[in-house]
Amino acid sequence: LMWVYGSEGVGKSAFAKWLAQYFDEREQLAASFFFFHHGRGRNHIRKFIPTIAHQIASSFPSAKQRIVEALRDPNSLDEMALKWQWENLVLKPLASINRPILLVIDGLDEC
């Protein structure tokens, strides 16, 4: 876990974008999400977990299988079950990947 912090405008998002591109080129990027205060669909937690889960499933077949199985649970799309979604659609699928990977989340304070 690496937390990048600093004043507004110092390049945190630029660094996160570069990092995501760098690891994507090496097929080590699990997923990325860039929250943006004024970005429609990019400023609410509701889009975050499904987007991350979709990216993970698209890149890693072993993780996709876990996500598909989890989505069979009727609680999977309940907005009130964010903890369940995080654990079952992101953390557990990521744990099934047997190599180094990176998950980039930027602008969490924009959510």
Image: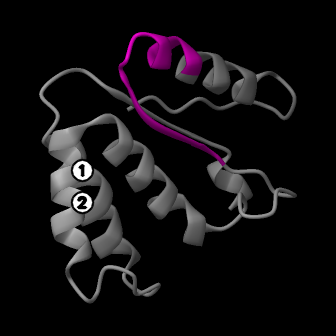
- Amino acid beneath label 1: Lys
Image side of residue 76 versus residue 36, left or right: left
Q: Residue 74 carries which label?
A: none
The magenta span reads 21-34
Q: What residue appears at the point 59 percent right and 29 percent down from the top-left corner?
A: 4
Quadrant containing the C terminus is: bottom right
**Residue 85 placed where, x, y %?**
33, 70
> Does the stretch in magenta take in 29?
yes
Q: Do the residues labelled 2 and 1 touch (CB within 8 Å)?
A: yes
Name the residue that disc number 1 marks: 64
State the residue position of label 2.
67
Residue in the picture at 40% in, 75% down: 82
Q: Which amino acid does label 2 sit on?
A: Ile
Residue at the image point whose x is 17% and y is 34% from the top: 97
Among the 4 quarters of the image, the one containing residue 31 = top left
| Quarter of the image with the N terminus in it | top left
Residue 65, position in %: x, y? 16, 54
Give the left or right position of residue 48, taking residue 107 as reference.
Answer: left
Most foreground residue, 83 or 33: 33
Q: In which quarter of the image is residue 2?
A: top left
Residue 111 magenta-highlighted: no
* Secondary element type, mark 2: helix
Q: How many marks?
A: 2
Q: Where is residue 28 in the image (x, y as percent from the top left)?
A: 35, 20
Q: In this view, does 3 lie above or below 95?
A: above
Q: Which of these two is toward me, 29 or 10?
A: 29
